[in-house]
């Protein structure tokens, strides 16, 4: 029991730590140029969940295919979705300003 | 050769009709045996009961709206009540009728039968999804009736946030919960289709209906989480005042529409793909012909599911989104029409030179083909940027989606219900009444919704409680059509009830159809099949028209298989 729980517990703690980094990073005011860096801890969290919680390390090709499809759809959501705010001219998106 | 086989099959059938006392309906009689069942067939019936309730509730709201629009000033309700009525109608019809409709009822019942399995892969998850569904439904209904929401089914911000009246968050919670029911159902179908196919049931031997359920399930699983997140963000902003959608807090109001339609455009295909599958089952049976271009039909289902994720921006052409993204979304929207059109050609190819029988399921299916085509083609008008500027938010849009969702999907649902009714209940329905209702639905539908295309074209906006007097004639026509439609939708309720009590006993295969579900008795035994079937043929292996003609010449019979 303990043997199987330990790794999961560690992964969970790692996730919490990454969440802390993410949250703290939001207060750093990295600006538009470096704000994208905050995607790194988020990506690491996705990888941890996929590899350990969803056990994709040992999964069949089919299951991995489905996981990849989910990632692909996420890319579509963010990619096609940011096309609009990035090219809007009539009423440009309010960019967060740093007072 | 096939004659000899038919004779024995006929004898076996006669025997099973007499002895079929031992089936999933008669297995146990207690209420608990229904509420705690894990039999996919019984869960399908639980779902049938629930969505029938939602269908008539949503229908009642629609009837009140059409009644109100008889006069330019609004005949019976106040503007506030009118807003609540269309919200009730939309929320109930979309989330608690159309999104689940065919997969959870017909899909639940026939999927294991079609692939030769004993049940779905996760029977308990199947039951759980029904409980999630009715829990979400109950919460939503409570909120709609106690709070009176007025945002429409789309819940756009800031109407649902800064200017919210009514219980936005409880409605969102109800929809959120029922979303988990969708995910559970989709997961179940995907795993079932991958893992539980009988020996010999290869992918290309599967009935088209299963391909369309599979495509639908992929959308359930991949799109629903985005809706869940969107609703959570909405609740989060409302409760904690975190700026997501509210510009005053640094949010973007159109972001809500992006996220909402990223789910909801694929969801409109959730609301049509299973219907395309049902129709692809019915047409070959009643045309006595192999489905034309099987591989095209099944891959088009998959293509529709994939492309449906790339077009959501066409709902926001005039919402202030960037013109560059609008051009891209317009182009992509045209692309999604291609696989839909290919399917229509395939059905027509199947009908060509077929021996067409106009039984009730077929009348629904043929009506579907015409109405779906009308809905799809007007979608192309709306996907055209310049045309959408005047047409957006008018009755043209209302007519467009009702042609697909009501003329198409609801017809497919009724067609499938009639087609599989003998299998589900073990009784035949009164054929004449079935045909009359089907024809009335087609007529009533067109009378209700065709005038709305013209109204929209003339500029009548949707979601208004009153209108200028010159629009009255078309509105009265539309309301008149809706009374015919209402009567026609109520008719099956009565003759199906009659059929349960007094209908003729159904043989295993009343339509002479191919497919595993017709090889087991009606109604099926608890375990579906006494021994696991082995599949040796392609689907829809009906004899060629030439062979039927030769047979007719020999026997002098006018219509094959009665
Ligand atoms: C041939 C493919 C289709 C195309 C190109 C298409 C295009 C469009 C466009 C451009 C709009 C936005 C109109 C506006 O608000 O100005 C729209 C609205 C809508 N369509 Fe379609 N459509 C298609 C198929 C479908 C299908 C299959 C369904 C449903 C099963 C559907 C349901 C809807 C609904 C519900 C709306 C209105 C949503 C609302 O604002 O409440 N469409 N369609
Ligand atoms: Cu759309």
Image: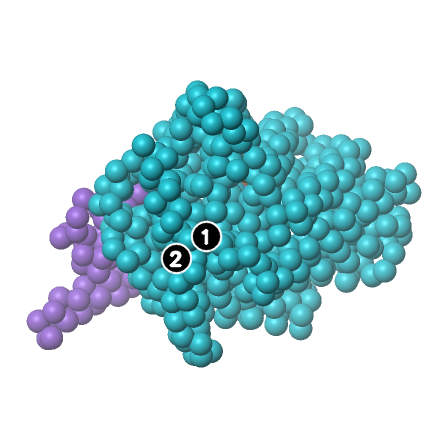
Chain colours: A purple, B cyan
Residue B453: where, in percent of width, then height? 73, 35
- The residue positioned 71% from the left and 60% from the top of the image is B60
Q: Nearer the viewer, residue A53 or B140?
A: B140
- The residue positioned 74% from the left and 53% from the top of the image is B487
Q: Chain of mark 2?
A: B
- Please state the total of marks drawn on the protein image: 2
Residue B55: where, in percent of width, then height? 62, 58
Residue B230 shows up from this direction:
no
Residue A77: where, in percent of width, then height? 41, 42
Q: Quadrant of ligand 2?
A: top right
- The residue positioned 50% from the left and 39% from the top of the image is B282
**Label of residue B507 in the image:** 1
Residue pointed to by mark 2:
B16
Q: In terms of secondary structure, where does tag 1 sit?
A: loop
Q: In terms of secondary structure, where does tag 2 sit?
A: helix
* Residue lying furthest left: A3
């Amino acid at each position: 029991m303990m043997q199987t729980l330990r790794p999961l517990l560690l992964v969970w703690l790692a996730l919490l730590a990454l969440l802390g980094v993410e949250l703290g990073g939001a207060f750093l005011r990295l600006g538009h140029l470096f704000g994208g860096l905050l995607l790194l801890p988020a990506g690491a969290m996705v990888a941890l969940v996929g590899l350990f919680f969803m056990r994709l390390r040992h999964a069949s090709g089919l299951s991995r295919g489905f996981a990849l499809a989910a990632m692909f759809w996420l890319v579509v959501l963010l990619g096609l979705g940011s096309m609009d705010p990035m090219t809007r001219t009539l009423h440009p998106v309010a960019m967060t300003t740093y007072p | 050769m096939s004659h000899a086989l038919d004779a024995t099959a006929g004898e076996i059938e006669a025997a099973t009709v007499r002895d079929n006392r031992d089936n999933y309906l008669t297995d146990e009689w207690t209420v608990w045996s229904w509420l705690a069942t894990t039999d996919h067939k019984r869960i399908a019936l639980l779902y049938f009961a629930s969505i029938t309730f939602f269908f008539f509730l949503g229908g009642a709201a629609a009837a009140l709206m059409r009644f109100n629009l008889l006069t330019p000033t609004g005949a019976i309700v106040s503007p506030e009540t009118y807003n609540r009525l269309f919200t009730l109608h939309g929320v109930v019809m979309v989330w608690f009728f159309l999104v689940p409709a065919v997969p959870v009822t017909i899909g639940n019942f026939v999927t294991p039968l079609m692939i030769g399995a004993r049940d779905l892969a996760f029977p308990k998850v199947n039951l759980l999804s029904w409980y999630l569904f009715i829990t979400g439904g109950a919460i939503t209904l409570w909120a709609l009736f106690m709070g009176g929401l007025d945002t429409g089914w789309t819940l756009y911000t800031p109407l649902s946030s800064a200017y919210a009246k009514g219980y936005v968050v409880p409605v969102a919670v109800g929809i959120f919960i029922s979303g988990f029911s969708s995910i559970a159902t989709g997961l179940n179908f995907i795993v079932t289709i991958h893992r539980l196919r009988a020996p010999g049931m290869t992918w290309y031997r599967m009935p088209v209906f299963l391909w369309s359920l599979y495509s639908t399930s992929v959308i359930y699983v991949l799109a629903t989480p985005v809706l869940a997140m969107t609703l959570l963000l909405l609740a989060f902003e409302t409760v904690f005042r975190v700026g997501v959608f509210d510009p005053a807090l640094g949010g973007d109001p159109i972001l809500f529409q992006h996220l909402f339609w990223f789910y909801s455009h694929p969801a409109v295909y959730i609301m049509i793909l299973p219907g395309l599958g049902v129709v692809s089952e019915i047409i070959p049976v009643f045309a006595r012909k192999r489905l034309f271009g099987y591989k095209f039909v099944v891959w088009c289902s998959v293509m529709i599911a994939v492309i449906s994720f790339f077009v959501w921006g066409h709902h926001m052409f005039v919402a202030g989104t960037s013109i560059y993204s609008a051009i891209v979304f317009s182009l992509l929207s045209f692309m999604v029409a291609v696989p839909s059109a290919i399917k229509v050609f395939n059905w027509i190819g199947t009908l060509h030179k077929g021996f067409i029988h106009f039984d009730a399921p077929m009348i629904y299916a043929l009506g579907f083909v015409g109405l779906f085509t009308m809905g799809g083609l007007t979608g192309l008008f709306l996907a055209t940027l310049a045309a959408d500027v005047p047409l957006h938010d008018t009755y043209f849009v209302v007519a467009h989606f009702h042609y697909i969702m009501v003329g198409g999907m609801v017809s497919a649902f009724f067609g499938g219900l009639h087609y599989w009714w003998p299998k589900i209940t073990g009784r035949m329905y009164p054929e004449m009444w079935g045909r009359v209702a089907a024809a009335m639905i087609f007529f009533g539908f067109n009378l209700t919704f065709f005038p709305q295309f013209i109204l929209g074209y003339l500029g009548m906006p949707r979601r208004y409680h009153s209108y200028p007097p010159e629009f009255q004639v078309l509105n009265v026509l539309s309301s008149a059509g809706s009374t015919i439609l209402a009567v026609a939708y109520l008719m099956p309720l009565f003759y199906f009830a009659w059929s349960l009590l007094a209908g003729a006993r159904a043989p295993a295969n009343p339509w002479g159809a191919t497919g595993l579900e017709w090889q087991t008795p009606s109604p099926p035994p608890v375990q579906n099949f006494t021994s696991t079937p082995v599949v040796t043929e392609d689907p829809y292996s009906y004899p060629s028209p030439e062979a039927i003609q030769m047979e007719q010449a020999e026997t002098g019979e006018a219509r094959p298989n009665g």
